[in-house]
Image (spheres, rainbow, N blue to C red):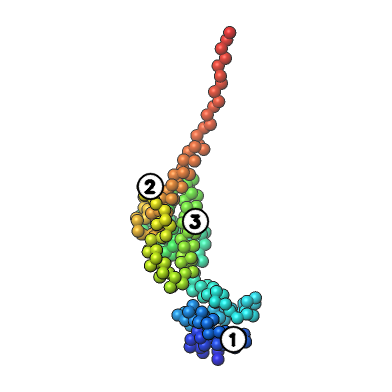
Amino acid sequence: MRLKDCRSVSEMLGVLMNYYRTLLTDEVIGLYLDRFESCDLRVFAAAVAQHLEDPARGQYFPKINELAQHIRRIETPHTLELTEGEAWAMVLQEVSRCSTYLAPQFDHPIVAKAVAAVGGLRRICMAEEREIGVVQGQFFRAFSSLIKRERDDREWLPAVKELRRELLGERPAYLRLVDRSAQPQLPPAPGALTAGTLSDGPDFQRWSQAVTERERQERERAAQPAAKPRTPKIRKA
């Protein structure tokens, strides 16, 4: 039987056992079925084929984590492979197209969230030349954080995601572990996200604004001329 002729994950496992001349116990087969029985058969067959082509691991019967890793790579959208530089290039393209008059349009939702997290496209357009590097750094940090969160979220199994929602709720766990009532609340920047638009957007905005304010103060201190040393007066006898 060929992989494309299999009608279930269990049949594919049977083909693999014949190929590798390996006999799995019912308990071990149950572990594979618990993990992959709900998987799309085409995706599972592609993951198996990818494992067979692996020059290092392909000579051994595939483990659950190896097949799961191949499946995640197959199902990962190209949007998660976007680099920081490519994302910033998309932002600059919208800056030149929209300026401060038109609403930006981003095909990449994470780019749109990162722009909103640093204060919106208007703030980027209004930034002075000496400030653009600061805004770019904040965008890179926001984009990297959002991409990492999206990738991490894809690592969770559907049942684990459901359990996390049940135990923790929709609000991120770290927001419940830290008492933010005693922390100073900074006013939002023009064009910033409103609360609830991004899962932890307001918190990220406050952090981003605090960084901007600290960097501004450092620039002002650096621009101030150094104080001249005072020459002590010598009294004549």
Which amino acid type is shown beneath numbered disc 1?
Leu
Vertical arrangement, residue 68 with respect to residue 132, above or below: below
Which amino acid type is shown beneath numbered disc 2?
Ala
Q: Position of residue 145 (x, y in %)?
A: 48, 59
Between 173 and 78, the one nearer to me in the picture = 173
Q: Earlier in the sequence, mark 3 or mark 1?
A: 1
Q: Which mark is residue 182?
A: 2
Which of the two marks, 3 or 1, is nearer to us in this view?
Answer: 1
Determine the secondary structure under disc 3. Answer: helix
Residue linked to disc 1 = 23
| 221 left or right of 172 in image | right
Q: Decide: marks 3, 1 in contact (CB < 8 A)?
A: no
Q: Which quadrant is home to the C terminus?
A: top right
Q: Is residue 70 visible?
A: no
Vertical arrangement, residue 235 with respect to residue 15, above or below: above
Q: Residues within 10 Å of mark 1 (few under 14, many from 20)?
A: few
Q: Residue at x 48, y 44 (%)?
A: 215
Residue linked to disc 3 = 140
Q: Residue at x 53, y 31 (%)?
A: 226
Q: Which mark is residue 167?
A: none
Q: Earlier in the sequence, mark 1 or mark 2?
A: 1
Mark 3 to mark 1 CA distance (whole Å): 50 Å
Q: Position of residue 78 (x, y in %)?
A: 49, 69
Q: Which quadrant is home to the N terminus?
A: bottom right
Q: Residues within 10 Å of mark 2 (few under 14, many from 20)?
A: few
Q: Residue at x 60, y 81 (%)?
A: 61
Q: Residues within 10 Å of mark 3 (few under 14, many from 20)?
A: many
Q: Position of residue 71 (x, y in %)?
A: 51, 75
Determine the secondary structure under disc 2. Answer: loop
Q: Residue at x 38, y 47 (%)?
A: 182
